[in-house]
Image (cartoon, rainbow, N blue to C red):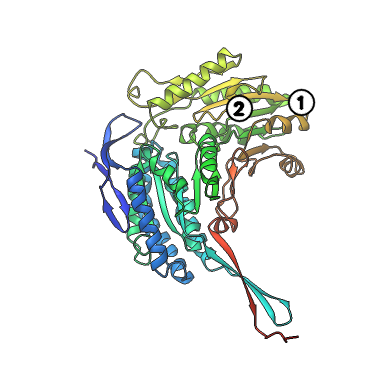
Amino acid sequence: MTDQLTSRQWIGGEWTEADSTRRKTIDPATGNEIGTYFDGGAEVCRSAITAALNAFESTTWRDDAMLRATALNHLADAYDMNLPKVASVLSRENGKLAGEAGFEAHFIPRALRFAAALALTTFGKVGDTMPGRQSLSFRQPIGVAGIIAPWNSPAYLSIRAIAPALAAGCAVVLKLPAQAAQSGQVLADVFSSVKEIPAGIVNVFVESGSDGAKLLVDSPDVPVVSYTGSTAVGRLIAEGAAKNLKRVGLELGGKTPHLIFDDADLAVAVPTIIASSTVFGGQFCMTGSRIIAQSGIAAELREALKEGLSNVRPGPASDPESQMGPLIDKDAVARVDKAVQEAIDAGAEVVVRGGPVTEGPLKAGAFYLPTLLEVTDSSLDIVQTETFGPVQTFRTFETEAEGIRLANETEYGLSACVWTSDVNRPLRVSRRLNSGLISINSWANLAVEFEEGGYKASGLGRLGGHQSIEEFLEHKQIAHQYIEQPHH
């Protein structure tokens, strides 16, 4: 029997179950209970904010850049040692296949090491504004950072925001949803092992609702909130934060287009386009959900995708033959299937009709087979709304200008892919696509060393790259008159 998992709140450097209700953690691949977690809310969050604020004001963390860089490097070392555990919990709790869980986990030490370098580069500037007078500009940590991370990639997406916040000198309150409770426990375990991080600088709580998250947004003691999740919730956070003129960073939804030109290499493109729908069960903000194919290659591409998607083998992470894991729960399966059926009823043509797995050994899990729908109307909800499942739409175009227009024809702008053998087209097209990340002859080609974020309704601000630390810093100017001015 596999060991049962337990998750508690990590507040002020201590494990606590106070103000929490014990609930079950369910494996989405089997429907079986794999552990328990303590479900918090507003009171747990309030305790976390108090602990973070006290630590920020009473320790040297905010003032000692070398301490922060050392801590972040030691944290990266600790994660290197714990990557198998991180990946194992992701597979059990999140349903990720072993390769997918390992892929998510491997980003974590890299992000921490990059942030350690950023911690040592928060230089200000000084300049003479007139004879005998100089001005100095300092970059200082903004204070307590509220970080609200999602369940779909909880390990990396938590660290992606925590790392630059700590590099800047902030204290952190991380809120994770119930579906990521055990990942939160592993995260807090690793943080607790790094002695350079003062108690209260990092606090982790889990809740199944949103009361704690709302408090992070409302509290005047939390001057910055970083949120990754849906556009609908992102809008609510932006509205709530406006009351205190609070800084917000938002990485929100996406409808990634694959823009495939006639000269694309389908031998390379097709496996990647299929994977862009099935990785994480399509529960990824950069899921390749819109296939936009030039007419000369469309028929061949359609048939190749039809064959490939029809033969994807779903299964649990424990089965090495599995090619796609489950959705997060049965409710997600019902939601995705409802969106697909509504699209068909609205005129979308079925190329591959997947759907829930309701028979056989996988029926107890939250499995959903890949679906491909051909469309001619970009206004359909299936084109415009983030489905968050293994569902793709297929549409053809004639000219480069038309392809670009169709790719931009949603409110989202998180990522896009361009497939072509032309040496000049990728850069020309990329400059016209309204997306924060463009992958050429590839998909979701992320690099923590460069800025990541979205255009339009896909978000505000950037994580990754040098810009990531700026989200958590304030600039302060000090004017110094160092020569006494003559009296007249």
Of helix, strand and loop, which one carries label 2?
helix
Q: Position of residue 235 (x, y in %)?
A: 55, 38
Image quadrant occupied by the N terminus: top left
Q: Amino acid at mark 2?
A: Gln
Identify the residue shown where x is 25% and y is 47%: 18
Identify the residue shown where x is 35% and y is 27%: 365
Q: Position of residue 387 (x, y in %)?
A: 52, 28
Callout 2: few (<14), some (14-19), or many (20+) C-alpha neighbours within 10 Å?
some
When asked about the image quadrant of residue 373, the answer is: top right
Q: Is 223 or 14 nearer to us in this picture?
A: 223
Q: Is 233 or 326 nearer to us in this picture?
A: 233
Q: In the image, which disc is placed on residue 297?
A: none
Image quadrant occupied by the C terminus: bottom right
Ranked by sequence position, the earlier of labels 2 and 1 is: 2
Of helix, strand and loop, which one carries label 1?
loop
Q: Which residue is under mark 2?
A: 384
Q: Is 301 or 344 nearer to us in this picture?
A: 344
Q: Which label sits in the foreground, 2 or 1? A: 2
97 over 488 or under it: above or below: above
Callout 1: few (<14), some (14-19), or many (20+) C-alpha neighbours within 10 Å?
few
Q: Which residue is under mark 1?
A: 398
Residue 224 located left or right of residue 39 = right
Identify the residue shown where x is 48% and y is 34%: 283
